[in-house]
Amino acid sequence: MDVGTFYALFSTTCFTLTGLWWNVVRARKDWTSDPPMRRTIGGIYLSFLLPALMGLFAQVGGTESPLLWRMSFVVIAIVGGLSMLRLVSLGRRDGATASVLWTQIGITVVYAAIAVIGAAPQLAEPLGLKGIQVEALLLIVLVALGHALVWRFMVTDRVDE
């Protein structure tokens, strides 16, 4: 698949997931009344929104303007990584489960990898891939981890059970 086509489909899918997550949260008003739960809900939201934004920048920058997608990936990944680090820190205090914390830590690691590859895409060359392709793979992992958090919410009444 052409990388431009991938990012077009990926970005659309992530924006759709963002909207679906909003509908789930809107239907569960009890979740938004609890501050620790609200923070985790926001983290899930970012796990879909930020990859969608990266996908848009990859489409605009692509191979013609690699600096555009690289800089946007670095900046957005730093925002996402710092947000997740904050959630992990507050989650420990709030009593979040180990599965939620480990998933959030995994998301933080993926954001760090996205920032590194964005800053130095030549690191992908030994893999026989372009930096933008490795970023695509990392974004897939990021969204999968976001889905893991959603699953946790959907199968329990509270995230700290």
Image (cartoon, rainbow, N blue to C red):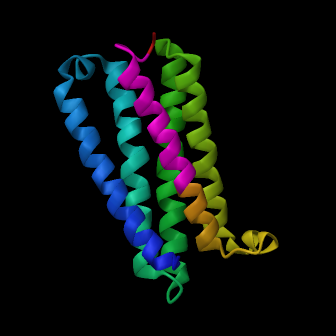
Quadrant for residue 124, please give it. Answer: bottom right
Residue 28 pos. (x, y %): 21, 23
Residue that extends furthest to the right in the rendered view of this protein: 126
Rendering coords of residue 94 (x, y %)? 46, 14
Is residue 107 shown in magenta? no
Q: Is residue 27 rendered to the left or right of residue 65?
A: left
The quadrant in which residue 45 appears is top left
Dominant SS in magenta: helix
Q: Quadrant of the C terminus?
A: top left
**Which residue lies at the image location 32% right of the left edge and 48% below the top edge?**
17
Q: Residue at x 49, y 81 (%)?
A: 62
Taking 148 as reference, is 38 left or right? left
| In this view, 45 is above or below 149 | below
Residue furthest to the bottom in view is 64
Side (left or right) of 107 relative to 143: right
Furthest toward the front, the residue is 1
Q: Return the x and y of residue 117 as percentages of the image width and height.
A: 66, 65
**Residues in magenta, as a range:** 140-159
Counting from the top left corner in percent of width and height, residue 121 is at 68, 72
**Is 146 located above or below residue 72 in the figure?**
above
Q: Residue at x 24, y 31 (%)?
A: 25
Total marks shown come to 0
Residue in the image at 61% along x and 28% along y: 102
